[in-house]
Image (tube, coloured by chain):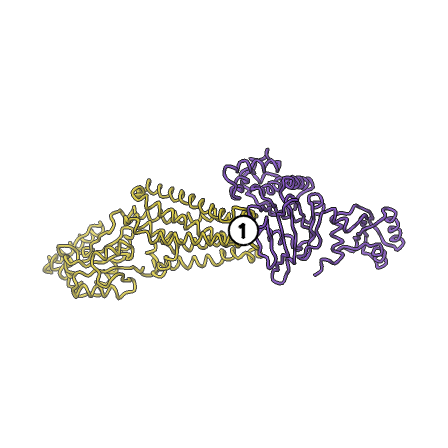
Amino acid sequence: MLLMLLNDRGALVMAFVLPVLFFLVMAEIFSSTTGGPIQLRVAFADEVQTELSQRLLAALQSGNSLEIVGAPRNSRAQVEALVARGTADVGLVLPANARSLADVGGMGPAPILIVSDPVRSVTVPMLSGQIQKAYFEALPDVALGSVVDVIEDQFVELNADQREEIATGLAQMSADAKAGVESGWSFGQMIERQDVAGRSAATNHVAYYAGAVAFLFLLFSCMQGAVSLTEERESGILERIMVGPGGMAVLVNGKFIFLVVQGFLQMLVIFITAWLIYGVDLPAQFSVWLVITLVACMTAAGASLLVAAACRTPSQARNLWTVLVLISSVVGGSMVPRFFMPLWLRDLGWFTPNTWVLEAYSAVFWRDAGFAEVLLPLGLLVLLALASLAAAQWFAVCRARV
Amino acid sequence: MPSTVLEITNARRAFADRHALRDVSLSVAAGETVALLGPNGAGKTTLIRAIAGRLKLDTGRVLVTGCDPLSDRAARHALGIVPQSIALYPQLTARQNLDVLARLSGVKSAAVGGAVDEALGRAGLRDRANDRLATLSGGMQRRLNIVAGTLHRPQLLLLDEPTVGLDLHARESIHTLLRALGDIGIAIVFSTHDFDQAAAVADRAAFMANGRLLQEGPVAELITRFFGDAKEAIVALSQPAAPSTQQILQSWGLSAGENSELWSGPLRGGYAELAQLENQLAQAGARVAEIRLREPGLGGVFRRLMESGQNND
């Protein structure tokens, strides 16, 4: 067994290299979510342009947990667009027609507006926490003054009766807090939330995972079919076909078409399940979904055929493909949403087909985007699919020759 | 006169410092069956690959029906190949295999059914058409493997060791099939180590060693060329020949193969001369396990070729 293992490079990679690589990627993701602050890409719009607003934004930017995207002075509409496109994970607007940042318990609109995409709703408490921290660190005078104001507003003179009254009030606040009822002042009153997409977060989440899981399994199932190319080379079928009038292109193209059709049916079943059980609005987006799904299937089919044609043995092809799919799926967001990842890993995701496919699905299902908005990811995926197919044909011919 | 289907002229090919083909020239006419014979590493498979367009020659050329198989699609229409392994899908039935391969070989959809039926009939597998390949015997699989190479009606069929690993009965069925293919006008070039198979099937034999084509010609003519009207004497010793024994055997024109206990060579005059040889060996104290005369065959030609040193670099 030892000799067999040593002579099988694919098995060696699977046994020793893949687990380490996989661990490194997952550790990087989860250490950033549990071991330290998750970096968020935030778009700011400061409509009030006061000393307080500038101090707050400067404090937010001084930490290493936020990366500012967009122009230095965005408008509110620009922030909404950046969040809607997914360029920013979340947006922060200090609206002009709201209360002052110093007016913590007053009437009127909240002085801080968080603009979020429902599918990334987890970014709202993350940014909220960052704002709260910055507020108390950067504006302690304002925060303490606000507390005194609150005491004056709610508890007035501090004589013995009033102390009792305060104690009663605090006890009531404590009871309310335990009951989950807000009473008195909370930082939450400073913040409002605005979603950029109309769909419910739950539905969008399902749409995301339908695409993520479907593409992951599409990649795996494609290899089951594509590896037959390597098996056919071993058995001599490829030699027979290459020598005859059909030629290699007939075989490789035939496999490509089969894999695309098989993959499409697989994706269709998953999305129909998501539609019937979770209400993902497949019928409304069917035409764009159809194009995205066909392109995704072409990409998976082309890439898997390329790996199968380039490898010498079926086991080598399976091992290499498993490594590539696992890494691509982790980095590309099929297993963990990319906004949980460190920024460098998110950027790396653009080199995986998973990211482009999920971006296209996200545009359609979360942002109601039309065909024009998914042209870039689709164009890149089509290029990848055709280049892979051409390379697969070339490798298939080369490997079958002496 | 039948047209030439295959024309090989001064084919040379080297892999690093190993010469796989050295100035090989050979032509095959329509309907002719040629056996490529020789030891392992002789260049038989390399030559078949070059004919199939799977290998680029360093110098020289291969023409199949006048076209270069490496670059000309027309040559591929004239070519069929039967790999040494069973190049079929084990999970499909015999009919499904032929159906798929016919389509992949460019047979038009309307003609696929007819081509498959014809191939099944030729292979004697009509009654097993719907059985999975894995359930067929080794001989049946081999026959199916061969007819799968004829689905697009090639003019030239290449086979690499078509009977390797088969029992006598299965080999006979392959011989019958190959002769039937030759009868319908398909030229066949096959490599083999089996001299009996070559003699049974081939019109011509081509002997190769060390990348060279040593001798080629019609089977009977080759045998006459090396043996004339003599028979082939075989002497098997029970121990390696002593110098005196060697001297006697060599004086009779016999030579040893790789094994110095087995001697052979042409012997004119028949059994009287054989008895004389046996007496001389007995007087010299040689322990003879077997001594006999047989009709010379391609094996004898091959042994004589090896002994003559024509295969040397």
For mark 1, does the 10 Å Cα neighbourhood hold few (<14), some (14 to 19), or many (20 or more) residues? Answer: some
Which residue, given by chain and number where applicable, does mark 1 sit on?
B72
Task: Report x, y in % for residue B239.
Answer: 81, 54
Q: What residue appears at the point 27 percent right and 48 percent down from the top-left corner? A: A368
Above or below residue B142? Residue B68 is: below
Q: Looking at the image, can residue B242 be seen? A: yes
Q: Quadrant of residue B43?
A: bottom right
Quadrant into which the C terminus of chain B falls: bottom right
Spot occupied by residue A159 in the image (x, y as percentages of width and height):
10, 60
The kind of secondary structure element at disc 1 is loop
Residue situated in front as seen by the camera: B26 or B15: B26
One can see residue A34 in this view: no
Along the line of sight, which residue is nearer the eye, B35 or B235?
A: B35
The three-letter amino acid code for the residue at tag 1 is Asp
Q: Is residue A287 left or right of residue A96?
A: right
The residue marked by circle 1 belongs to what chain? B
- Which chain is in yellow here? A
Left or right: A342 as drawn, with respect to A225 = left
Q: How many marks?
A: 1
Q: Which lettered chain is shown in purple?
A: B
Q: Residue at x 29, y 53 (%)?
A: A120
